[in-house]
Amino acid sequence: MSAPVSSPGLPDLRYGEAEEELRAAVRKLIADRSPLTAVLARAEAAEPYDPGTWQALAADLGCAGLLIPESRGGAGAGYREAAVVAEETGRGALPVPYLASAVVATAALLPSADELLAALADGGVTAALTMPFTTMPPAVSGAALASGVRVGRPGPGDPAGQARLTGTVAGAADALPAGVLLVPADGVPFGLYAVDASAPEVTVSPVVSLDTTRPLADLTFANAPARPVATGEAAAAAVSAALTAGAAMLACEQLGVAERCLEMTVAYLKERRQFGRAVGSFQALKHRLADVWVALTQARAAARYAAACLADGDPDTPVAVVLAKSACGEAAVQAAQECVQLHGGIGFTWEHPAHLLLKRARSGSIGFGTPDRHRAALAGLVNLPPPAGPGS
């Protein structure tokens, strides 16, 4: 199969042979090691993460190092490949820290080529950026970065260059399995620091989360030792790049959720029979599924455009990200709701995995900013005037 050819000056939104081979490998691994039934069993047993599947995905397939250069032990790929993996982890509601470690944390470290990248490349170490999961990328929102952590003075006997951090962060995603925490901290200047998550001065407290496959945690730093990764404008740019990449790849994950929900629903409606015929033959249900398909098709284009813009460093990336995050968030929720409802009584039970996808869709629509917040940001990015008020 030859690679798809795009029009000059336009990103190609189709996937080529290499991307589809990666998709097939990831999908097979998930189907073999962590199907939805296994994810459901882990959730009921209060075991949110699947370390075995994560190690296979990260090390055996090399997905943890897709964005990391080969010189640092990674695959030297890009965001198109990372988007493919994100779609597949969304399809499976996979309880692994792919988004947090292989995308967000990695994107934060790439500008400085930090030494931690080599450890992240094979998944032996995982990292998490300690920002609330709801934080919008500054490149999109235009808001200044705010951190609940401050930089303090080094303690007696601390090595040169080490800092001490104090403060709290609420609702960070995938901080529980992280070995290293990347902490944006206010100081003179603002900085990004690497902190050992197992340090006695660090407390990671699980909180009740809607999505049990991506738990949240509150973090407390009590004069915790920290290694500087970047400072000043470089640190702010690194955090912004990480949040932007996270929002785009979360949109791709939401696309995978929507696709899986639609496939499950169509398959069920072909099998379920009432009044002597498959319920999928009823016109009203066809219309509902058609609406999901249209939303999904639009979301797919938006998600792949965002991935292509990130891969190419396109200046249109902020616009692409808000389009993707808003379209994919809403498409995933719509598809998941229809999946639950159109499965009938079984769809509303805990025994059916539909609720895993619904929760993943709902939590993902909030992560890195809701669809409404992204649409509001889009108006500013493209210079749309506000709606006219009464009497104007």
Image (spheres, grey):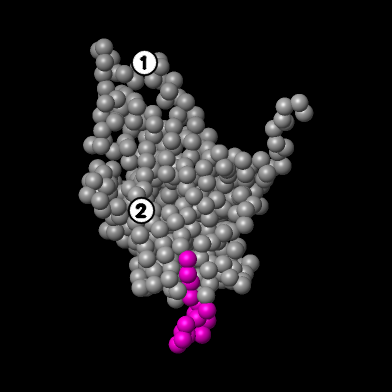
In the displayed structure image, the side of residue 26 where residue 235 appears, left or right: right
Against 273, is 66 above or below?
below
Give the residue type that dot 2 points to: Val
In which quarter of the view is residue 195 placed?
Answer: bottom left
Q: Is residue 186 magenta?
A: no
Q: Position of residue 80 (x, y in %)?
A: 50, 51
Main secondary structure along the magenta-highlighted residues: loop
- Residue reaching furthest to the right: 392
Q: Secondary structure beneath disc 2? A: strand
Crowding around mark 2 (Cα neighbors within 10 Å: few <14, some 14 to 19, many 20+) is few
At numbered mark 1, what does the secondary structure look like: helix, strand or loop?
Answer: loop
Which residue corresponds to the image point at 48% horizontal and 40% vertical from the top-left? 329
Foreground pick, 340 / 91 = 340
The residue that appears at 29% across and 52% down in the rendered structure is 48
| Residue 57 in view | no
Let me know if residue 350 appears in the view: yes
**Depicted 290 relative to depicted 220: above or below:** above
Relative image position of residue 224 (x, y in whole percent): 43, 73
- In magenta, the rendered stretch is 153-167
Q: Which mark is residue 282?
A: 1
Percent x, y for residue 46? 25, 51
Write down the residue under mark 2.
Answer: 207
Q: Position of residue 240 (x, y in %)?
A: 57, 58
Disc assigned to residue 306: none
Labels 2 and 1: the sequence-earlier one: 2
